[in-house]
Image (tube, rainbow, N blue to C red):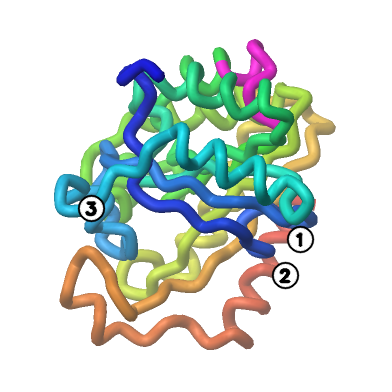
Amino acid sequence: MTNDYPPIKDFIESSFLDWPGHTCAVIFLPYCNLRCPYCHNHQLVLKPDTMETLFLETILERLTALRHKIDGICITGGEPTIHRGLPAMLKIFHEAGFGIKLDTNGTQPDILQYLITEGLVDCVAMDVKAPLDDTIYARCAGVFVPMSIIKRSIEVLVAADVPTIFRCTVTPTLLAESDVYLLAKGLNDLRTEGLVGQDTAMSLTLQNFDPANPMEPALKDVKPFTEKNLSRMQEQINRILG
């Protein structure tokens, strides 16, 4: 097969967690245009050449053998949308009869629009790193990200006829509780600004920070929010987004 397909660096045969309501395989693509301090896949981001590259043919053979156990594939990373060959890879998987969930950081809205228009994704999970503020977002993403790009990706996803999951990883030293609510308010404000429909249903799922293997070593000493506090914040977010 052509070398234009993105390199595959890891493969999980079966996951019950990566696509809610589905049992899916998980495919990991390398590299990322962000440097989130809490990222636990930093070998995939910074040193993918130290990892074995898996052949697409081999993965397809394994997926075929797993067809009776899985009903989809989650494509994650790294950041999948930075690879020019991603659409061709997704087309291969779709033609083989698998649904596709895509994980993304939302920095490539035109690619997201193309994938949706071409019917190459069946679900998208976008990680929104922080409130829609340049300074706070840069702190959590590790690089500057224009908010116009993030807002455009959100606009693309909520307008699409594709299930979308907005997520935020909550790291105590990077995001205060008030920042979490500011993010929810910012998403809600997109309705009043007319970027998304007034009646558009929106939700935000909080994910707790895992100190086991962060990109920034100093974060290993940071205690995550307690599950009780995280649940309380999630309830407040649900109220804000209504």
Range of magenta residues: 115-122
Three-letter amino acid code at disc 1? Arg
- For mark 3, give the secondary structure: loop
The residue that disc 1 covers is 239
In front here: 193 or 18? 18
Q: Residue at x 36, y 29 (%)?
A: 6
Q: Is residue 105 above or below residue 172?
A: above
Q: Is residue 176 above or below residue 122?
A: below
The residue that disc 2 covers is 235
Quarter occupied by residue 200 = top right
- For mark 1, give the secondary structure: helix
Q: Is residue 51 left or right of residue 183?
A: left
Q: Is residue 237 left or right of residue 9?
A: right
Q: Residue at x 62, y 61 (%)?
A: 15
Q: Is residue 188 left or right of residue 1?
A: right
- Is residue 126 visible in the rendered structure shown here? yes
